[in-house]
Amino acid sequence: MRKVLPFMYRTSVSAGLLIAMLLAPSAMAAEKVVARSGNVTVTQDELETFLRSLDASSRQRLVADKPMLERVVQNRLAQKAVLAEAESKGWTKRPEVAAMAREASQQMVMRSYLESISQAPQQYPSDAELQAAYDANKRALTAPKTFHVAQIFVAAAGDEAAVSKARKDAEELAKQARSGDFGAIAKARSQEPRSAANGGDTGWVSEAEMVPEIRSNVVGMKVGAVSEPIRTPNGFHVLKLLEVREAGLRPLAEVRDQLRATMRQQYEADAVQANIAQKVSAQGGNAVDKAALDSVVSSVR
């Protein structure tokens, strides 16, 4: 059966799309501007094109994380500023740069064409193929033990007196949280804005995702328990263990869409390679002038 690639998230724009974005003309006046620095802009159309280039999972995570999305826009703005500076100095007219641009353009055309003729059939994979891939990849589809944790965070920076005060504040908050509404206290007093807005909820995390100080406490807690303040380099964390999910094989229904997308990507990647191999085979054994090749090798030594 077809080997399935390991699951991965594509979190950055592909090299081809990045080049296309950098070489694109400046935004027209009618386009909505998302970010501006001097004469350099990032338009709504550019940002939407980038987001649509991502797989669905990465796209949803990025649009849900506004600070990260802002950093992406800022990086794009910086890239365009560098491009504008290079163009102002005639960099695009340098022969070696023009040659690289032609090569990049040819590569994008080739990749786009190969992708267009290598599309997986609409019905692929079938239910039977999905089940077979699921059965063959159970190790990769086994989720680790995870912990649903909420926190109240008290920052601790400065001298010993400031840290001591932060510790006492955290101890008092832990005491209140054990007898009161943890979520309400976290929303009102926690100094970590993102989780505070959700009543302290930090979501589900595995042991591997926790810093050692947090991990050593969480793994020994009972559901519903509130910890003593835990010191980390940034401050003190008062934790509440909300739920525990034991390690286990994720059901097919849960991973069906992700597995299907991965199988289709693998199918299309294999089809691209098969097309290239077919073109190589069609050349025959005499396509390369060995004497000319030896001359090239000698000239670059």
Image (cartoon, rainbow, N blue to C red):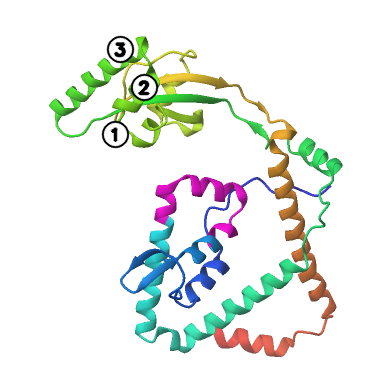
Residue 301: tell me if it is visible. Answer: no
Q: Earlier in the sequence, mark 2 or mark 3?
A: 3
Read off the residue under disc 2: 184
Q: Point out the image quarter for the C terminus.
A: bottom right
Q: Earlier in the sequence, mark 1 or mark 2?
A: 2
Question: Which corner quadrant of the image does residue 39 belong to?
Answer: bottom left
- The reply to whether dot 1 and dot 2 touch (C-beta < 8 Å) is no
Q: Which residues are magenta?
A: 50-71
Read off the residue under disc 1: 234
What is the three-letter code of the residue carrying label 2?
A: Ala
Give me the C-alpha separation between circle 3 and circle 1: 21 Å
What is the three-letter code of the residue carrying label 1?
A: Asn
Residue displayed at 40% across by 71% down:
80
Read off the residue under disc 3: 175
- Determine whether, in the image, residue 197 is placed left or right of residue 110: left
Residue 51 in the image: above or below residue 92: above
- Are there few (<14), some (14-19), or many (20+) residues within 10 Å of tag 1? few
The nearer-to-camera label among 3 and 1 is 3
- Are there few (<14), some (14-19), or many (20+) residues within 10 Å of tag 2? some
Q: Position of residue 254 (x, y in %)?
A: 69, 34
Residue 257 in the image: above or below residue 43: above
What is the three-letter code of the residue carrying label 3?
A: Lys
Q: Earlier in the sequence, mark 3 or mark 1?
A: 3
Q: Position of residue 198 (x, y in %)?
A: 42, 30
Residue displayed at 16% across by 34% down:
158
Does residue 59 show up magenta in the picture?
Answer: yes
Q: Residue furthest right?
A: 128
Does residue 262 show up magenta in the picture?
Answer: no
